[in-house]
Image (cartoon, coloured by chain):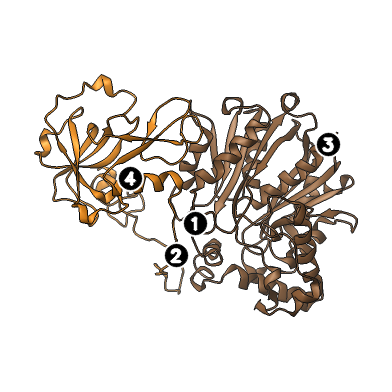
Chain colours: A orange, B brown
Amino acid sequence: MTADDRHPDDPDRSVSTLPGGLWSQPQPTVPDLGEAEPVQRLRIPAAMTYDYTPGLAQSRFLRGLADKKILGERCPVTGDVYVPPRGVSPVSGMPTTEQVEVGPHATVTSFCIVHIGFGVNAPPTPFVSALFLPDGAAVSLYGTVQEIPHDQVRIGMRVEPVWVDDDELTTSMENIRYWRPIDEPDVPADQLKGHM
Amino acid sequence: MGAPDRDVAVVSVAQTTHRRAATEINEVELIQPVIRQVLDQIGAGISDIGFTVSGSSDYLAGQAFSFVMTLDAVGAWPPIVESHVEMDGAWALYEAWLKIQAGHADTALIYGYSKASPGDLPRVLSRQLDPYYYGPLWPDSVALAGLQARAMLDAGTITEQEMAEIAHRNRQAATTNPHAQLQGSAPVDELLAAGYIAEPLHRHDCPPISDGGVAVVLAAGDRTRDWSDRPAWIRGIDHRVDSHNFGARDLTRAPSIALAAARAGVADGPVDVAELHAPFTHQEKIVRTELGLSDEVDVNPSGGPLAANPMMAAGLIRIAEVAQRISDGSAGRGVAQATSGQLLQQNLVCVLEGE
């Protein structure tokens, strides 16, 4: 008998009672309290509101998106262009100040085929989520690939962003609806080393 | 506490100019110049640092794993030895000190920072409370401080006049601190004439809400000579907790401070300067009493947390302020105290000394 076959009340069961041991919480168990009725669960809703501000570099990036531009920022030490920028080069610790437009064409550096969709904007399953290295950038952006059967997506594939209609453009990552293939030869994987 | 095996000193400090809301910048943009300054002023780079540790809180940032993103400001490549505490940076410094004592590092970079401005701080701080009995009631930090002040007034250990004098003294001292958020104070009688915000607390009894950060470099033994002509040696450091159940505590006292002070050796020599992390006026009286400081001690020449109170940084700033005064020769021996949690529940005491 494997751990996953044990009854949920078996104290020696695995933490999860789901197949494969994924995601679940254990059944609540309490020690013998004698006469007392155990309180097994408290529901205490808690919510806090934050006015989040993205900062200088991310504001520049988000404003670029409203113009259908992908704006990275260059490390003053290594010359690498980071996108989306956070204001500081993660390699040198120095502020990035030079803005560089990257893409819009990009290369798939990794992907996975999703069979269980999460979130309100998830496309019908199965779909492909992927990382896209915009031309001129050192790091990849996240998004989905569409307009191609999911089993034909591959690392090195060339793509372009599909933007929302111009009257729907805002300062948001949601401006890029998804990425689609373009008619260019694949980039050999060894050219993507260090950018995966 | 027995004498530590290795002599460790503060060799560099830097902090932001604290302000109510740094809305235009994110946390990494807030702390990056401070980290750069604390290294640049001793001519060091991250490759010279053996251990890096920070103090911050996702509850303040409103973001999960916010400290990971802030690591960008360190330049953590090639990979570094790094840690984080969800506490004030003073406890990050304690971890670094232990790491050095254990022989795992000779140098350390410590920083603490926060932007309290995105959230509603008094409510956010209520999330520090236990989730069963206090948390569901959402008692805010100012109301809780009011309970403590009331207990002290009732016990006769402080007066509202004394509280106003503490506010006045700290904020007047802050006029010479370029990093302070609140500088200067109206006269005491004017302060007392204003209304209450959580009786018996007036507005002047409460710390400002601040965005800001601080960074410190520690070095051991001979390494200090590369970076400082007058290092501020850590002669003792200890931290202790009191119960977080308010009903189980005498709110007019903080025995954890007295215990940490004894273990850190506060009374083993003269105290020229003390920087106290007492966010509310009445708490300064408790801290001062528990530390056993005489009336001659210069308390909070920086203005203390009543002049600038960036969460997760204000405790480490106390250590930085004392170290600065030792390194510039204006003090020979000093005490820094940092607090965490509600109503001085957890406390760290650090004794620093020149040569």
Chain letter, disc 4 residue: A
Q: Is residue B198 visible?
A: no
- Using the rendered image, report if marks 2 and 4 lie on a common chain: yes
Residue A59: % across, % down: 40, 48
Distance between mark 2 and mark 1 Cα atoms: 9 Å
Viewer-nearest residue: A187 or A55? A55
Q: CA distance from mark 3 to mark 2?
A: 46 Å
SS assignment at label 1: helix
From the image, tell me which residue sits under label 4: A64
| Residue that label 2 marks | A48
**Residue matched to label 3:** B354
Could you confirm whether marks 3 and 4 are on the same chain? no
Q: Position of residue B101 (x, y in %)?
A: 69, 32
Viewer-closest of B164 and B7: B164
Q: Residues within 10 Å of mark 2 (few under 14, many from 20)?
A: few
The label number, if any, that marks residue B59 in the structure image: 1
Residue contact at pointers 2 and 1, CB within 8 angstroms: yes
